[in-house]
Image: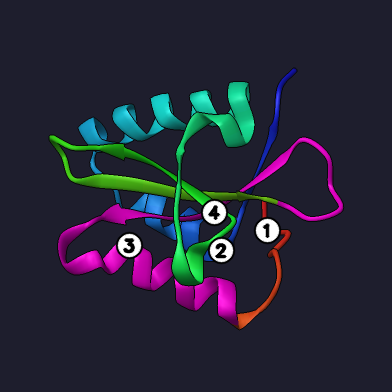
């Protein structure tokens, strides 16, 4: 079973800002999400309950994603970024609070 990835305008910008080596790592994480869906990452809590993360410790990068309600086999990429000062999690929380899923692909 392959999951579809749904990008927000913000997460698409996050991805575009990555350098080449960071994109290679993130692409591997995205492939894991496509293949395994919510089983691909570790659960988050608090304001990001219902979201999961895939992390790359060496680069400090995180991919925050969630299952889109009412859409089977669709994973929304909420944020991509560094954990430094929990910035990626603050961005993800803000983006989720603004509105529901963004259908920008």
In this rendering, the answer to whether 12 lies above or below 56 is below
In the figure, residue 103 lies in which quadrant? Answer: bottom right
Query: Spatial distance from mark 2 to mark 1, Cα to Cα?
Result: 6 Å
Tell which residue pokes out farthest to the bottom in this image. Answer: 98
Please indicate whether residue 46 sits to the left or right of residue 50 in the image.
left
Numbered circle sitting on residue 51: 4
Identify the mark at residue 9; answer none if there is no mark.
2
Q: Which one is earlier in the sequence, the residue at label 1 or at label 4?
A: 4
Q: Residue at x 46, y 36 (%)?
A: 41
Q: Is residue 15 left or right of residue 20?
A: right
Q: Which residue is mark 1?
A: 104
Label 3 with label 4: CB-CB less than 8 Å: no
Determine the CA span between mark 3 and mark 4.
13 Å
Q: Percent x, y for residue 96?
A: 57, 71
What's the distance in space between the residues labelled 3 and 1, CA to CA?
A: 20 Å
Determine whether the residue tagged by mark 2 lies in a helix, strand or loop: helix
Q: Residue furthest top?
A: 1
Point out the stretch of residues depicted in magenta.
Answer: 68-97
């Amino acid at each position: 079973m392959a999951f579809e990835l749904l990008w927000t305008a913000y997460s698409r910008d996050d991805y575009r800002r990555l350098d080449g080596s960071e994109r290679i790592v993130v692409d591997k994480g995205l492939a894991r999400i496509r293949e395994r869906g919510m089983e691909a990452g570790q659960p988050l809590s608090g304001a990001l309950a219902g979201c999961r993360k895939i992390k790359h410790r060496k680069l400090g990068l995180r991919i925050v994603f969630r299952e889109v309600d009412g859409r089977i086999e669709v994973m929304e990429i909420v944020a991509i970024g560094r954990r430094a000062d929990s910035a990626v999690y603050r961005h993800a929380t803000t983006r989720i609070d603004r509105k529901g899923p963004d259908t920008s692909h």
